[in-house]
Image (cartoon, rainbow, N blue to C red):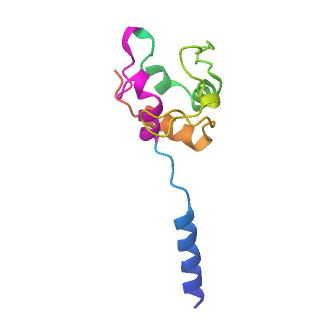
Amino acid sequence: MHRAVVALLFAAGVASAAPAPNGKLIYTASCAGCHGLKGEGGTGGLSPNMKATQKASFTLFRRAMQQGIGFAGQKFQPVMPTFGKTGLATAYGKRPTGKAPSETELKALYRYIRTLPVK
């Protein structure tokens, strides 16, 4: 009986846990429109490729995303949105949520960007 109760409680906890954010979906919805699906960058150099982002620490990446400050200390505005204010888009083509991204979402996005085949 005790095992059945423990198993039931464990299953209920697992079932109610929120799914982990998907870095690829976040990137596709919020970043690829300007930076390219493979992180190759936009035309005319306006949206750089993801090479520098792949080399940056998570701390610098988080600052860039939340505060709009680049890795060398430059301001991204008005070119790139500050996602700490606008939020990330929930699906490609949709408006950002208006809610600052969570640490978990930023980490998922950061991990995904580091896998892009940027040359």
Q: Is residue 30 magenta?
A: yes
Q: In the displayed orientation, state which residue is furthest to the bottom.
A: 1
The magenta stretch spans which residues? Answer: 23-44
Position of residue 69 in the picture relative to residue 108 (left or right)? right
Q: Is residue 51 magenta?
A: no
Indicate the position of residue 44 as horizontal and vertical percent values: 39, 8
Indicate the position of residue 77 as horizontal and vertical percent values: 60, 15
Q: Residue 58 versus residue 81: which sits nearer the camera?
A: 81
Q: Image height check: is 47 above or below 36?
A: above
**From this viewpoint, is residue 114 visible?**
no
**Residue at the (63%, 26%) spot, across then down:** 63
Q: Image height check: is 17 above or below 93?
A: below
Q: Image height check: is 22 above or below 58?
A: below
**From this viewpoint, is residue 49 visible?**
yes
Quarter in which the C terminus is drawn: top left
The quadrant holding residue 96 is top right
